[in-house]
Structures are given as C-alpha cells and as structure tokens.
Image: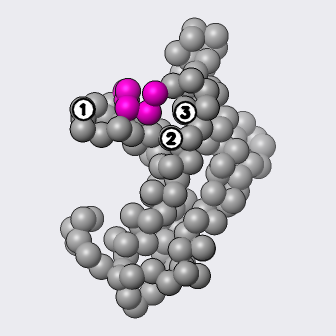
C-alpha cells in the first residue's frame, strides 16, 4: 500500500499526523524555536522540518487511534475527525509519569530547547 494513496487508512493516518504535527509546531514556536530548522529533515520547501523530526515518538499512538477509527470511506466523518483529533488527550508515560500527548509534546519541546541552549545534560 502506498502511504500517499487515497484510501480510508491513509486519510485517517494523515489526519491524525496533521493534528499531532500542528501541536508540535505550536509547542516548538512557544519555546522560541523555528519549526523550519530541522535536525534530520532539511527540505527548504518544508516549513515544519523540526516538527517532522519530533513527531516520530508519537506516530505509533496516531496509528493505534487511526486503526480504531477505520471506516469504509476515504472522507472522514465529523465523528472520525473528532476521535482522531482527540489523540492529543491519549495518555503516555514520561519519566514514570502519566501525561497526555499534548503535555508530552510541551515537555519534549522544553527539553529540546534546554538541550539547544546547553542548559541540560539530556540527550
């Protein structure tokens, strides 16, 4: 299956990834980073290279939510969009603490900034 193909699976994955990518872009801007300056992604046409770098730990959660919301149509219903947008409220573990994905993104962005500013031993 082509990940860019038009089908119900890809439309749900793409929607979920867009929700998380947008949250990451907002979080990295809020800590003073520019979303276009990525670490591994460096396409000069991509305004969200850094967000694309930082989304990787969250892809599996989007995959699970998308799997649970597979419908027969490529076009998502309002309920399916709501369920996929709700991915930001799913729980994950950060340093033995249970937080939602939105909080995890904020913590990750703050950690990234501390690393850039040499204010942390984190790697």
As drawn, 37 above or below 60: above
Q: Evaluate if marks 2 and 3 touch, with contact meaning CB atoms under 8 Å apart.
A: yes
Residue 98 image offset from top left, x and y in percent: 76, 49
Q: Quadrant of the N terminus?
A: bottom left
Magenta-colored segment: predominant secondary structure: loop
Give the labeled residue for mark 1: 44
Label 3 residue SS: helix
Which labelled disc corresponds to residue 25? 2
Residue 48 falls left or right of residue 123 = left
Residue found at x 48% / y 49% = 21
Question: Residue 35 magenta-drawn?
Answer: yes
Residue 6 falls left or right of residue 96 = left
Magenta span: 34-39
Residue 2 image offset from top left, x and y in percent: 21, 68
Residue 61 image offset from top left, x and y in percent: 54, 59
Q: Residues within 10 Å of mark 3 (few under 14, many from 20)?
A: many
Quadrant in the picture for residue 75:
bottom left
Label 2 residue SS: helix
Residue found at x 48% / y 63% = 16
Q: Quadrant of the C terminus?
A: top right
Residue found at x 67% / y 35% = 107
Which labelled disc corresponds to residue 28? 3
- What is the distance, in whole Å, between disc 3 and disc 1 at their CAs? 18 Å
Residue 41 falls left or right of residue 31 = left
Mark closest to the chain's N terminus, 1 or 2: 2
């Amino acid at each position: 299956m082509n990940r860019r193909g038009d089908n119900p699976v890809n439309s749900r994955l793409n929607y979920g990834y867009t929700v998380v990518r947008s949250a990451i872009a907002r979080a990295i801007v809020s800590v003073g980073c520019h979303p276009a300056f990525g670490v591994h992604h460096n396409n000069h046409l991509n305004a969200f290279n850094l967000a694309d770098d930082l989304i990787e730990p969250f892809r599996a959660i989007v995959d699970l939510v998308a799997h649970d919301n597979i419908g027969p149509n490529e076009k998502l219903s309002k309920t399916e969009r709501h369920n996929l947008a709700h991915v930001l409220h799913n729980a994950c573990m950060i340093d033995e603490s249970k937080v939602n994905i939105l909080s995890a993104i904020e913590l990750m962005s703050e950690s990234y900034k501390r690393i850039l500013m040499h204010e942390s031993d984190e790697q």
